[in-house]
Image (spheres, rainbow, N blue to C red):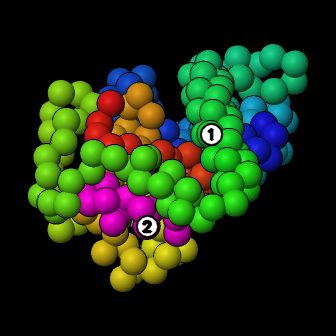
């Protein structure tokens, strides 16, 4: 994976699928398998090298030799590396989503640079957020037909998303502008701001965090 599309911050895990596929693993084997999947997500397919695989799984050589045949059932060895079909699909999907977001962000940056009128830039932000109401308790349609109340006191999205905003923007900023946002996971990870002010702050002040997380700001859930 190139630097521009490298996975970061979060790790996709469909709990139901994972538990169904790993019901016969021991606790130690679960830990080793998850460490392999996490390393696969961030670094790509691991090499078919017992020393490297033992290091990834935090096992000594003896324990790894006993564990290897069990975990190999979830992989195939191809061109000297361990391949996992689901991991390859998830990484490709994330790279494509991040590429599209980067292109949108770049297009927005070029538009601002070309404008000599600062008010035009403000109007662009307003157009992105048109339709957001001033009410802090607006209800939006969720991605699976359920509703997410955007006037909640705590952020309803993934904890790692809030942690990233917290590290960059601070607790006060998150409480004021992030925590009341609605959350959408599919078809793309997105924040639905409760107010125009919150949406404007997300777009203007937290653009780097949005880009790093591969998030978009929507008027309402898709």
Magenta part of the chain: 193-208
Quadrant location of the C terminus in the rendered image:
top left
- The correct choice, above or below, for 8 with respect to 1 in the image is below
Can residue 44 be seen here? The reply is yes
Viewer-nearest residue: 28 or 148 = 148
On screen, residue 55 versus residue 131, left or right, reads: right
Can residue 67 be seen here? The reply is no
- Which label's residue is closer to the chain start, 1 or 2? 1
Viewer-nearest residue: 179 or 38 = 179
How far is disc 1 from disc 2 in space, using C-alphas? Answer: 18 Å
Task: Give coordinates of residue 145: x percent, y percent.
Answer: 18, 27
On screen, residue 95 versus residue 12, left or right, reads: right
Please identify the quarter of the rendering in which residue 171 is found.
bottom left
Name the residue located 42 percent from the left edge and 47 percent from the top edge. Answer: 127
As drawn, the residue found furthest toward the front would be 117
Name the residue located 73 percent from the left edge and 52 percent from the top edge. Answer: 114
As drawn, the residue found furthest toward the right would be 79
Q: Secondary structure at mark 2?
A: helix
Q: Which residue is mark 1?
A: 104
Q: Secondary structure at mark 1?
A: helix
Q: Which residue is mark 2?
A: 201
Total number of numbered discs in the rendering: 2
- The correct choice, above or below, for 8 with respect to 188 in the image is below
Task: Give coordinates of residue 44: x percent, y percent.
Answer: 74, 36
């Amino acid at each position: 994976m190139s630097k521009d599309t490298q996975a970061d911050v979060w790790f996709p895990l469909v709990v139901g699928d994972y538990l169904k596929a790993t019901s016969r693993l021991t606790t130690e084997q679960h830990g080793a398998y998850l460490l392999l999947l996490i390393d696969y997500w961030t670094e790509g397919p691991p090499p078919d090298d017992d020393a490297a695989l033992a290091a990834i799984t935090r096992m000594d050589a003896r324990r790894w030799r006993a564990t290897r045949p069990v975990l190999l059932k979830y992989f195939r060895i191809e061109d000297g590396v361990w391949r996992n079909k689901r991991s390859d699909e998830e990484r490709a999907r994330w790279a494509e989503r991040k590429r599209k977001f980067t292109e949108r962000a770049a297009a927005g940056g070029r538009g601002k640079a070309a404008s000599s009128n600062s008010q035009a830039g403000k109007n662009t932000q307003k157009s992105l957020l048109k339709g957001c109401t001033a009410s802090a308790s607006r209800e939006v349609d969720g991605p699976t037909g359920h509703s997410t109340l955007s006037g909640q006191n705590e952020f309803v999205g993934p904890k790692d998303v809030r942690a990233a905003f917290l590290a960059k923007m601070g607790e006060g900023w998150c409480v004021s502008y992030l925590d009341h946002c609605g959350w959408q996971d599919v078809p793309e990870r997105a924040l639905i701001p409760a107010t125009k002010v919150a949406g404007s702050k997300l777009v203007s002040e937290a653009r780097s965090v949005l880009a790093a997380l591969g998030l978009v700001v929507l008027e309402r859930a898709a």
